[in-house]
Image (cartoon, coloured by chain):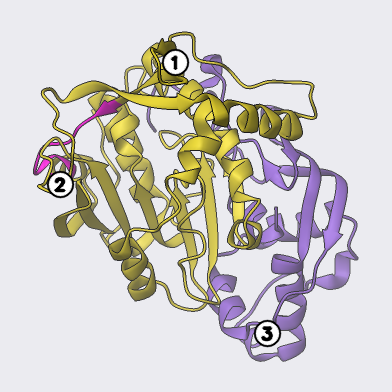
Amino acid sequence: MHVPAARRTPAIEAEHVRAVYDTIATHWSSTRYKPWPRVAEYLHARCKSGHLIADLGCGNGKYLGCAPQGVVVVGCDASAALLSLCSKTPAGRAAELCTADVVLLPYRDGQFDAAISIAVLHHLSTRQRRLAAAAEMVRVLRPGGTVLVYAWAQEQGEESSRSFSHQDMLVPWHFADSMRRKSADASTERHGGAKTSQQPQHGYRAEGKHSTVFQRYCHLFKEGEVEALFHRVGGCTVVQSYYDCSNWCAVVQKDVADKHNIIE
Amino acid sequence: MRLLTHNVLRCAIKGVEEGYPLSIEASEVQMEESPFRPDFVKHIAPTLNWPALRQAVKQVGLPEDMLPEAVSDALLGDEAFLRALHRVLMDVHVVAGALVCPESGRRFPIAHGIPDMMIAEGECPRDDK
């Protein structure tokens, strides 16, 4: 089995995902504080006291506090800037955190009772990388464990103001000048003033809006694409799929007969 | 980073077979008491890698005999044992230091309790096992 360069971060993700999130973390986080209700419901339904839960791509940690008492959540994200926002909240301090890449998780096989990966897969720019991430999500689950996956949909519902003409898009983020100062302070605090995170090179001024525009790379999923991805991975079963909050969503269960996860 | 998390973490860089268990080089360790949950400990105990946990206990400077050499069903009914295990898994926080891969020597720094497990470009394995 061969994964051609699936684990390497392509330049488009380095510039249009990681560098952007590291830069806009504080601003982005201030607009993403409210957990989506169905994700919180899943955590309550699936987590029992004593469970070890993985939040794969936990962002600013808005789901870390949604798991019931007596559960330990391990959150990871590729953005150190977002993780540092996690640790500012009580739920983030109670949780366990590490910086890690979802295409190559730093966990042993079969350790987690359940997992979530919310709005993460759509930032991976090739099918090989999305497959590698899906395989990793299944690998770290215990047999019988489930992962809830949300990926941004190309098909936008009536509630959305967006429409996507293509599956692979650069989606603009207006980074307000007023937030730039705050983010710079947070970055200095995080790195003790010694090291600054990677800045995106492509930002441009939005005329008359006191903001800089950064473009986030997104692969918009079509109906059935999340399921197809996990079907290709194998060793797991999609037990539920639905559309929610402009995302295609699936609950994927690792098969109890622990077959190898296959990627070609 | 709690020792529970340490028990799960591995090094995944190119050329490494197991990458486990990671050695702990702790420069700052904090103890913080948390509510004792026997159900949690009983649930997690069978999946723990016991030698890795014993090694971690030693490396953070706790007494080696805090945990027995092996875990048994009988011990899972022993409250004193469950309390000691809970303390090891949940109450020991490595705040600063590093995790070191036993095979490659790769160091993963820990700052503010957060291990940096990101892998650099040249370290990515190209083939899936």
Instruction: Judge the density around disc 3: few (<14), some (14-19), many (≥20) Cα neighbours within 10 Å.
Output: some
Classify residue B1 as left or right of residue B40. right
Where does residue A221 sit, x and y in percent of width and height? 17, 36
* Residue A59 visible somewhere in the drawing: no
Q: Which of marks 2 and 1 is nearer the N terminus?
A: 1
Residue at the disc numbered 3:
B75
**Image-quadrant location for residue A240:** bottom left
Q: Are marks 3 and 2 in contact (CB under 8 Å)?
A: no
Q: Percent from the top left, x then y, of residue A216?
A: 36, 24
Q: Mark 1 points at which residue?
A: A15
Q: Do labels 1 and 3 share a chain?
A: no
Specify the quadrant that holds the C terminus of chain B: top left
Where is residue A155? Give x, y as percent.
Answer: 10, 39
Please report the residue visible at 70 percent of the width from the left and 67 percent of the height from the top: B90
In the rendering, what colour is chain A? yellow
Tag shown at residue A227: 2
Cα gap from disc 1 to disc 3, whole angstroms? 52 Å
SS category of the residue bearing label 3: helix
**Residue type, mark 1 in image:** Glu
The chain identifier of the residue carrying mark 2 reads: A
Residue A80 is inside the magenta segment: no
Instruction: Tell me: residue B82, above or below residue A83.
Output: below
Stretch in magenta = A218-227
Which of these two is toward me, A24 or A117?
A: A24
Q: Which amino acid does the dot numbered 2 rest on? A: Glu
Q: Is mark 1 on a helix, strand or loop?
A: helix
What chain is colored purple? Answer: B
Labels 2 & 1 near each other (Cβ < 8 A): no
Query: Badge 1: how crowded within 10 Å, few (<14), some, or many (20+)?
Result: many
- Nearer to me, A155 or A103: A155
